[in-house]
Amino acid sequence: MIQLNNIEKYYANKGIKNYVLRLVTTTIKKGEFVSIMGPSGAGKSTLLNIIGMLEEPTYGTYEFLGEDVTSLNERKRIERYRNHIGFVFQAYHLIDEMTVYENIEAPLLYKKVGSAERASRIADLLDRFNIVAKKDLFPNQLSGGQQQLVGIARALAAQPSIILADEPTGNLQSAQAEEIMTLFKKLNQEDGITIIQVTHSEKNAQYGNRILHIADGVVKEDITVA
Amino acid sequence: MFKLNLKIAWRNLWKNKGYTLINVLGLSIGMASCILIFIFIRYQMSFDEGFKDQDRIYRMVSSWDYSDGNQFYSQGVPIPITPAVRDDFSPYIEKVSAIQNSGGIVKVNDQHGKEKVKSIENVFYVEPDFFEIFNYKWLSGNYESLKEPNHAVLSKEMAKKFFGNWNDALGKTINYDGNLNYIITGIIDDVPENNSVPLRIMLSYKSLKDRNLNNWGSVSSASESYFKLKRGIKIETLSEPLRLFIKKYYTEKAPGKEGHIFQPLADIHYNERFGNFSGRIMPKKQLYGLMVIGLFLILTASINFINLATAQAVSRSKEVGVRKVMGSQRGQLVTQFLTETFIIVLISLLIASVLTEIALPSMQNLFNAKISFSFFQHPIILVFMFVLVVCVSLIAGFYPAVIMSGFNPALAIKNKISANTGGLGLRKVLVVVQFAITITLIIGTLVILQQMKFIREQPLGFNPTAIAMVDLPNDSLTVERFNRFKAQLKQLPGVEEVSFCRTAPSSQNNNGSSFAYNNSKDADFQVNAKNADEDFLKTFDLKLIAGRNLSKSDSTNEFIVNETLLKRLNVAKPADALGKMISLGGQKKPIVGVVQDFKNKSLHESIDPIIVCSRIERYYYAAVKLNAKQMMTTMKSVEQVWKSNFPEFVYNESFLNDDINNFYQGEKIMGTLFKVFAGTIIFISFIGLFGLISFVAAQRTKEVAIRKVLGASTIELVRMLNGSFLIMVFIANLVAWPLAYLFISKWLSGFAYRIDISIWPFALAMVISMAITLITVSIRSYKAAAANTIDALKYE
């Protein structure tokens, strides 16, 4: 599903190249649950951003679903956001001015899903995540864990094939974090959604089935979890 | 999607109530001013519109070129010109008609022959062809009857005034000027106010008795001539026939070379050179000036919006990032942000409409015009408001929308968009532009007020205070009663002096006559002859600098001249002129006195050469100098005495001071407009500034807190926050100065007597703008600097 070949990323500053990623080559297959781990500044988030097409690598090629997407124009990139990729953020990033319901609805509107279909999908998601009662609340009226649930529901609304999560539990207490990770695992196993997450926590990484250890921009270890 | 956009927009606006308020306040005031300006301009542009074939209607006007380079223009033409044009221009023109303005007393009797109405009215002698040129709406009767003398046509309003019901008027008679009865043979619908020929009472042209009926050498602004071109003829083709025409008819030698101009109907309302019967002239220049001010207002308000929106952009960067990764296209984001702008503009429009309605009466007062804010009467206003909303939404909304929608999602999501994105540079430029406009207007206002004060305090060369100008009926019968009337006036307690004269020393009613000095041939310039009795100098407090006053006489026996006349004749010492002969209007009499120059026109114009002489047939006013303490009571007795002497006439008075002030009506309006609009723009600019400093203060809360921990004092912090704003306003001053200089020097050049442009208005504008900036900014930055440090640091 994802094929990265010799991905490099550096920032040139006064002629000195500061490498963030060096020669990263890896393949992620459909249905995998990959955790990217490593110390601060190792390049985890940059790698995730490149996979999410938010940044372009300075060198190397990236194939997504068999197509070269190393540098796509905006229109094509947006098309992939609408249909294939769901993002989950550490700081949830719900839109403050929209209710829970509207937040989940937003990607469907961009995808131009019909209103009946929209309603049923949202109802389904609300139900599944037990947040029906909260659908008319605004993000600031929810706890962190609840906000992240909404964030995930929103990421799932467009029925993506892959979810990219950048430290999804970084701002959460451990009980809530556990709940989110269990949810991810369930989504991965029951719905077959590919998940790539960046995490600091060894414990969270254990929920997935593969761990990429990165340090100083280089993949040090690629472990399959039993 | 659109509905959702609206909803989000509404919540966003509500969340940032403060900024929304500033935007709405600025935009609504700016838009209200624009709407007011628009409806005023619309009204002015509506003059003389709506006639059939109006493009083919022209007015013939006159011009004179003098050998000294002066030119003189008149809206009038010699009375015999109309029949001559009818003959000589028949291949080119369809119809031509003379129209003669006059005023006098109209009397109407009821069926028992008792006097029912007696009033001073403005009347027009018109030829029937006039109605072939202008297609007025006829309610009853027709204009055929005007071919014969002693017929009249009334407007509906007049018919109602004279006969109660306009339906009853046909066939009845009115009496004009005491001696002639006119039969009403037609009623036209009221001619709207926006018309240069305010027809109300129209009399048969054949009834006109004027001593100049055959005189090509006399032109009065009361005699106009209109014509309609034949279809398909270009006005340029008439220039050669006109040249021949002038050669053919102007056979006598005159100091000024006669010329005629065909003035299109559409030009009459705007051309300052020529007047018109309605007395309403609105130079296009002034309309353009107003348009520019309107544009400035909207620009200033839009700049507020742009600045606040781009400043706020950072706080919305996360939303932009999230939306983008959810699959929103840039265009959709632009639409969303524009929707928000649109809502603000729409709310502002509603408030602006209310403000317009509130401001309208004072506007009507100021311009003395019946402008109305009615969509049904003038749907064009609705169109304008629509265009205004769209334009403002785009001007104000487009740039911020483009900036915000252009955020890089990876950075936006991580909150790495810094406060300076969205064009800190541009924001600074816009603030400078905004304040340059504001400061230009401040300087303009200061100069206009200064010039008005200068004019008010300018020595006129005579004393106009407490002088009442009372109309003097002048015909062969009334002249007999002048002496008795004057004697009676002088006896009244409270009356200090009385002079009978043709006009006051300063008047809009001026004439020019050829004359010869000291047996030489006619001078190459004309002289302004003022007819007055021996009390003229005393009453108006005019100063003699040589010779003596006129002696009492009813006819011209001697002349008094002014300094300007002598200067023009190159007579160095006033005393040298005494005893020299002047030939004027067939009279050759000596100069007995020289009077110090006095302003005989508005201060736009310089002083004319003037001759003062007695001539009782030309006394149209009794100038009554009153004791200032008992003016009102004295005027009552003056009126009584007048009525007992001239019972068959209608009394009319005015005060010279008011008349002189009326010369500067245009400037007064201009001054008021500038004060109001400058005030408005200042207000808009400064609330914008307040919004911006609020934002900057909020952005820098953490920085301020850290600096405080490091030991900065509140004053130092306020200075830090204020600094950039003061610099921007200072730069704006530098930008505004040359602009303002150009503008005011142009405006001042329209006055013959004007102030010198000094540094003071500029310096004062700078002090004002800097001071207000300092106050505005300090209020907010002090609050930020004095805020509790712990709260700010804990916040992150």
Image (cartoon, coloured by chain):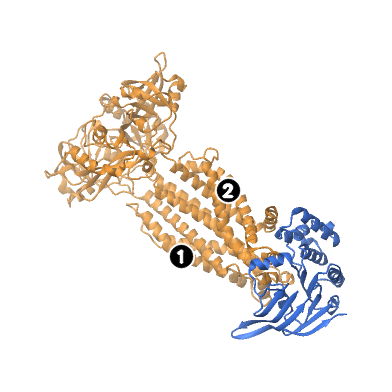
Chain colours: A blue, B orange
Graded by Cα atoms within 10 Å as few (under 14), some (14 to 19) or many (20 or more), the crowding at tag 1 reads some
Residue drawn where x is 20% and y is 46% of the image: B525
Task: Give the residue type that dot 2 points to.
Answer: Ala
Residue B178 appears in the rendering: yes
Snapshot quadrant of residue B702: bottom right
Residue drawn where x is 55% and y is 56% of the image: B301
Task: Give the residue type that dot 1 points to.
Answer: Val
Q: In the current view of this chain or complex, which residue is farthest to the front?
A: A66
Instruction: Judge if badges 1 and 2 mark residues of a common chain.
Output: yes
Secondary structure beneath dot 2 equals helix
Q: Is residue A192 left or right of residue A21?
A: right
Snapshot quadrant of residue B625: top left
Snapshot quadrant of residue B790: bottom right
Residue B227 at x, y percent in the picture: 32, 36
The quadrant of the picture occupied by the N terminus of chain B is: bottom right
Q: Is residue B694 left or right of residue B226?
A: right
Front residue of B185/B581: it is B185
Residue B222 appears in the rendering: no
Is label 1 or label 2 in front?
Answer: 2
The quadrant of the picture occupied by the C terminus of chain B is: bottom right
According to the picture, the residue beneath numbered tag 1 turns out to be B735
According to the picture, the residue beneath numbered tag 2 turns out to be B352
